[in-house]
Amino acid sequence: MTEPARDSRAERAADSRRPPGASRGPWGHAVVIGAGFTGLLTARVLAGRFDRVTVLERDDLPSGAAHRSGLPQARHPHGMLARGARIVEDLFPGVRAELAAQGAPVFDFGAGFATRLPYGWAPRRPVGIEAQSFDLADLEAVLRARVRALRGVRVRDGFVVEGLRLSADRRRAVGVTGHRRADPGHTPVRIEADLIVDAAGRRSRLPGWLAAAGLPVPRRLKVPSPLVYSSRMYELTGDQAPDWLVAFEMTLPPSVDRGGAAVTVDGTRRLISLVAPAEELPPPRDDEALLRFAATLRSPHFAEVMARGRPVSPVYRSVVGGNNWLRYDRLRPRPDRLLVAGDAFCAFNPVYGQGLTVAALQARLLARLLATAGGPGGLAHRFRRRAARIALVPWLTATAADGGWSTEPASRPARMMRGLLDVVLRRLPDEPELYARFARVQNMVASPAVLLRPLLARPGRPGRRTERAARTAPDPRSGNGSDRCARHRRRRRTRRPAREQ
């Protein structure tokens, strides 16, 4: 339960005389909730400014690269867009080489990806963007070891944060309360802090803590997705290895409602994920049905790996999660010294691979704000406002695609973004130069505006092959296309519509 801290009268008087943003002297103690990717990057940034940084993690963290129960999505493919990878490399020099030494390949995005778009295959040629595929557990293990080695940083795992502590006037956060998971009596523990960052991801409990303190909670923007994952690791011998490092089949509702992703974890292992609405994806334990499902996809790569490779893990199934944006940037009043980052702030449909890069951009933003701030006071407001700007374009992109699942009228920006996306996707198979630009936008190293020039230069009809692909989408390989579209239309009429809560 949230409980206000009792500041002394002298402290409150001193605060009233202190200029906004001024520091009491040493920066003191920062607390980060969550030791996932976002929390680790945040701790790295804070370690350069605060005397002490404590990372609180609910799970018992493994000593090496192993999956943990609190991060079930780590068992599914993840990708780091080029912009995010550059930031991570800046914060942790040599990380890319360290992962490569463990077998995670580095390659050109255009040459290494075998991408089946809704209207045809993406061109397979270099685009000048360096990419790396990996297992998220391996990436987190490398980053966690780096963070543990930082001076003044402590990672406390097996610690459950239960509440937020506020000043008497509820204008600023001053600490958290919690308990050790291993403590049978759940003895309450108070941790004082000069700055708190919630990096707990989708399982963040901050809205409830704010409500318990009598403060307003952020408005939730939600664009759902009915998709679920079924993922499994396969091992292939050298002569079985395909000529691609990442295979991807994009969904585009309502016409293309199933797809998949496959990433090379190291020289012999491929992590395969099949994606579809829950009622269409076979049960995890039915291997033959999963293989038959993979054969219905327009890309043959998933079924080929599943047929040739040896499974080395169970099938893990989980809900994709859709898109959720908690508008902390619009809270009034908003407690100072309390930041929210990563999926706890804005969570995207992971199918589009934006989450890690947006979290990295927020970490870089925090580093820049810390470099010019006089202290932790006032930092939270500046961070929230600019973090929202970072999230805006990825949000519009993801929700423009996922808006096809909803029967509700889309907003004008969403309609414009979806219209642009559809025009671009129709032309990509026939225009390698346009695809190179699209790859830069997809990797968040260029603005979507770079796509407008080639579209305006050739505003005519798409090429013949693209028209033919459009007429046959979804591909006959995926079964009776008209029947599947009819089923989807029936689902859309009965599905709970997207809404703002």
Image (cartoon, rainbow, N blue to C red):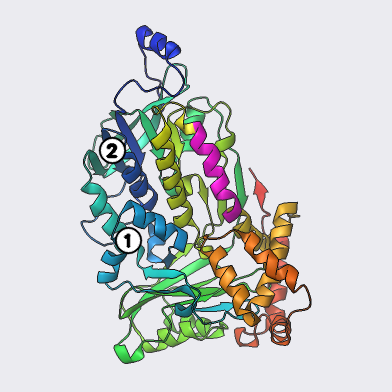
Mark 1 residue type: Leu
Q: Which residues are magenta?
A: 381-394
Callout 2 crowding tier (Cα within 10 Å): few <14, some 14–19, many ≥20 = many
Figure quadrant of residue 58: top left
Residue 143 is covered by the magenta coloring = no
Which numbered disc, 2 or 1, marks the residue that appears first in the sequence? 2
Quarter of the image where the C terminus is located: top right
Query: Which residue is under mark 1?
Result: 139
Q: Residue at x 42, y 71 (%)?
A: 231
Report the Cα–Cα distance between label 2 and label 1: 21 Å
Residue at (42% x, 86% y) in the render: 243
Q: Nearer the viewer, residue 183 or 217?
A: 217
Q: Is residue 312 left or right of residue 341?
A: left
Query: Do callouts 2 and 1 mark residues in contact (Cβ within 8 Å)?
Result: no
Give the image location of residue 357, x and y in percent: 46, 56
Q: Which residue is mark 2?
A: 54
Relative horizontal placement of residue 203, taking residue 461 as reference (left or right): left
